[in-house]
Image: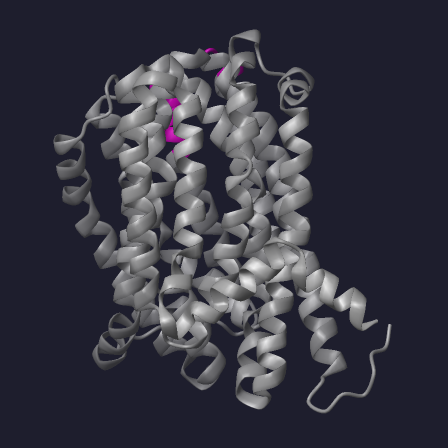
Amino acid sequence: MRFPNIPGFDQQALEKYFKNTGMMFIGRIGSLAIKMFVGIAVANYLHRENNGILTGGTVYIYFASALAALGLDQFIVKELHQFPENRDQILGTSFWMKIFAGFCCVPIIYLAYTIYPAKGTPYHYVLIFSAIGIIQAFNVIDSYFQSQVQSKYIMQVQITGNLVSAAVKLLLIHLQMPLIWFVYAYTFDFLLLSIGYYFTYQRKQRSVYNWTFNFELSKKLLKYSWPLIISGIMVALYMKIDLLMVQNISGAKEAGAYATVANLSEVWNFIPAVIVTTLFPAILNAKRDDPGRYKKRIQNLYDLMVYISLPIAVIVTFASPLIYHILPFKPEYYYSAPALSVHIWSGVFVFLGAASSQYLIAENFSKLTFIRTGFGAVINIVLNLILIPHMGMMGAAISTLVAYASATFVIILIPKVSEQGVMMLKSLFLISLVQKIIKK
């Protein structure tokens, strides 16, 4: 397929980005299918209460992982895109920064558990999960392949890792192993990915042993990424705190059922992540070469997010009872379907928020991510405290939806980026689509 000869338009680059996106989709869809059915098998085996206890332990790791990641992933891509000759220094510096942050997270997790423990989840489960913050340092390799538009290698690692992980969990179910073994298995998932990243990077004259640490570069990265560190924690807070609050307010059984709602609703969230991370280099090129085309690409990105997320939300809203019956859930989970019909709409705002976050990074407005995520976290916690005691998981689903929408569109109140809020509204209400149709 050929496109018109537009100044600054690179046909080969487009095909490269499209191919890379397609490879990432294949990998994520394969991983998604594996994780979904194994996750259902685990939920059925553990039943609601143990499933809730397991999920409660993982919530702390979402917070810690956000801190251990240091908000560096997109900045690694950006640095590698601008200074490819400094690859070993950029990756080495980022890696050791993440290792150090991972170790620092262990006492922080303990403090978080002490302040707000998950009822029924023993601390030693959480301690085992704490290793994930250290293991995930090898994710810098993922960022490297993104910068090279070579995500097919990451796809291979993820699919292989998920196949091995699935086999391990199914074996544990077959052997009727106790809950603690699933805690180890969950942590093992991240170790598998890190091992896969390591061996994948070692090919073609690349070696992690050539990585070096540069103190000045670490200061530069932290200078730009610290708002994303805080916002990452806030994102984890307002995306996962509902699971913990349901467990502590309504009990582990309700939390175990609500975990299936969150998993089914959020299973689509890999789509915006794949799209925006793959197209980020193209957006940066447009910003550098053609401001008009840059703005148009941002609007098109918002439109694409709505075109994908809106049909998903509509379909799942009406099909949620059928979904619980078609997928091999046990009847004890069926009553969760109404909450899924509400929770699924939060995905529309996740899609748009993921796209607008790329704009904030491109324009060096990353500090604003703290404002939007902090606002969303406060909204979510307050609404959870009000609604969960009276409505259980449905209250958590409503709180999550309102929080996601608030976090995404709060930028419309900030003058220097309010235009982006308007652009997202144009996409959300299909105004942009109508304008394109009229122009034709």
Q: Residue at x 45, y 75 (%)?
A: 362
Q: Residue at x 79, y 68 (%)?
A: 438
Image point 54% across, 43% down: which residue? 347
Residue 162 higher or lower than 39, as above or below: below
Residue 62 rendering spot, x and y as whole percentages: 34, 42
Which secondary structure is most common in the magenta stretch?
helix
The answer to whether residue 167 of the structure is visible from this angle is no
Which quarter of the rendered picture does the C terminus lie within? bottom right
Q: Position of residue 167 (x, y in %)?
A: 56, 28
Residue 174 highlighted magenta (yes or no): yes
In the shown orientation, is residue 420 left or right of residue 114?
right
Image coords of residue 265 (percent x, y): 54, 34
- Asked whether, in this view, residue 293 is left or right of residue 82, the answer is right
Say which of 92 and 222 sits in front: 222
263 vs 359, nearest the viewer:
359
Identify the magenta region. 173-186
Please state, as top left, top right, bottom left or bottom right, where the N terminus lies in the image.
Answer: bottom right
x and y percentages locating residue 330 in the rendered image: 57, 10
Q: Relative to the observer, which residue lies in front, 428 or 285?
A: 428
Q: Does 62 appear in magenta?
A: no
The residue closer to the viewer here, 304 or 383, is 383
Whether residue 110 can be seen here: yes
Residue 435 falls in image quadrant: bottom right
Please determine whether, in this image, residue 129 is positioned above or below residue 64. above
Judged left or right of residue 117, residue 93 is: right
